[in-house]
């Protein structure tokens, strides 16, 4: 008995046309990205970094950073990536696949399902990369970075975004409706936002919860972004964080490919 392995049907031309179309559509919706990348971090840093942070800095904390603002800044960048990748992988994905029918219509062109899958996840990540540049600019204006390695933080955040976008797209493509989506936000996104080390060290958590946190790509994204900001990241640590997030991306793309193929063939 032989097993046939479907190879990815992806061409550079197909992906190029997909991104050209998305960029054309993006011209009328780019303002929302400015809110995500500029105003949202600005408000967070003012409230959490300088407001609450002022109280934290008065006490004796051992955060490994000169201030609480320097601690949570990179963490907020990574958790914003998590939130963006998850949210964009839910309702917008369902809309294109089932409600609006945009991707079903796209298959009338030479575009393949594999190109559609990689392009969709890539476009989610590319838009966040643009937002992360603005976000990083805000962090720099607040004096958060302690190292020149911080210039790589937008790439680390985009990697985190893709590590959540790919599995979430796989989940969405397997659903018949959006009934479970609010539960994902409530029981996955919010706990990861609070307990991934963005606001306080996970060493403060019970041992079992701390180990669970270490298994999430959000914690790896936070550690990667913070390590680049403080200059404390080692090469081995960086490669470990990248590999862990990369595994989520590869598995997510594989499952998304199967789910999207099945949905569009129905």
Image (cartoon, rainbow, N blue to C red):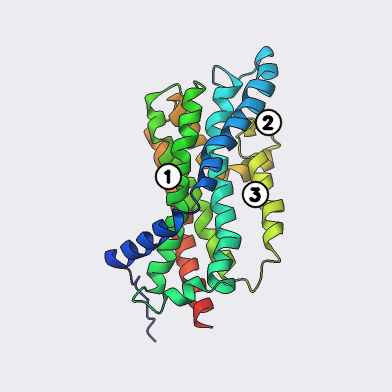
Residue at 57% x, 41% y: name it. 79
Q: Nearer the viewer, mark 3 or mark 2?
A: 3
Q: Nearer the viewer, mark 1 or mark 3?
A: 3
Report the Cα–Cα distance between label 1 and label 3.
21 Å
Judged from the image, the secondary structure of the residue bearing numbered disc 3 is helix
Q: Residues within 10 Å of mark 3 (few under 14, many from 20)?
A: some
The image shows residue 213 at horizontal and vertical percentages of: 61, 43
Residue 65 vertical placement versus 214 (above, below): above
Of the 4 image quadrants, the one containing the C terminus is bottom right
Residue 60 vertical placement versus 215 (above, below): above
Sequence-first disc among 1 and 3: 3
| Tag 2 residue | 204
The image shows residue 46 at horizontal and vertical percentages of: 63, 26
Q: Residues within 10 Å of mark 2 (few under 14, many from 20)?
A: few
Answer whether labels 2 and 1 touch (C-beta < 8 Å).
Answer: no
Total numbered circles: 3
User: Can residue 257 be spotted in the picture?
Assistant: yes
Of the 4 image quadrants, the one containing the N terminus is bottom left
User: Can residue 241 be spotted in the picture?
Assistant: no
Residue at 48% x, 49% y: name it. 30
Sequence-first disc among 3 and 2: 3
Residue at the outermost bottom position:
1
Q: Nearer the viewer, mark 2 or mark 1?
A: 1
Q: What numbered label is drawn on residue 242?
A: 1
Residue 10 sits in quarter: bottom left
Residue 161 vertical placement versus 54 (above, below): below
Q: What numbered label is drawn on residue 189?
A: 3
Sequence-first disc among 2 and 1: 2
Report the Cα–Cα distance between label 2 and label 1.
25 Å
The image shows residue 116 at horizontal and vertical percentages of: 42, 68
Report the Cα–Cα distance between label 3 and label 2.
20 Å
């Amino acid at each position: 008995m032989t097993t046939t392995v479907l190879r990815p049907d992806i061409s550079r031309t197909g992906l190029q046309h997909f991104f050209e179309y998305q960029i054309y559509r993006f011209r009328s919706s780019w303002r929302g990205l400015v809110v995500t990348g500029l105003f949202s971090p600005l408000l967070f840093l003012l409230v959490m970094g300088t407001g609450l942070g002022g109280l934290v800095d008065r006490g004796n904390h051992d955060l490994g950073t000169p201030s609480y603002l320097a601690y949570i800044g990179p963490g907020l960048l990574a958790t914003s990536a998590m939130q963006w990748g998850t949210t964009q992988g839910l309702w917008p994905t369902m809309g294109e696949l089932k409600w609006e029918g945009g991707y079903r219509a796209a298959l009338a062109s030479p575009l393949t399902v594999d190109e559609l899958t990689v392009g969709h996840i890539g476009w989610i990540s590319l838009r966040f990369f643009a937002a992360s540049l603005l976000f990083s600019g805000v962090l720099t204006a607040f004096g958060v970075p302690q190292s020149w390695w911080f210039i790589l933080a937008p790439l680390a955040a985009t990697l985190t975004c893709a590590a959540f976008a790919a599995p979430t797209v796989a989940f969405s493509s397997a659903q018949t409706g959006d009934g479970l989506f609010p539960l994902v936000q409530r029981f996955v996104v919010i706990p990861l936002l609070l307990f991934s080390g963005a606001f306080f060290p996970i060493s403060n958590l019970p041992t079992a919860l701390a180990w669970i946190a270490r298994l999430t790509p959000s914690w790896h994204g936070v550690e990667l972004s913070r390590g680049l900001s403080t200059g404390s990241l080692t090469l081995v640590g960086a490669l470990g964080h990248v590999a862990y997030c990369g595994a989520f991306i590869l598995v997510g793309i594989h499952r998304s490919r199967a789910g999207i193929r099945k949905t569009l063939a129905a």
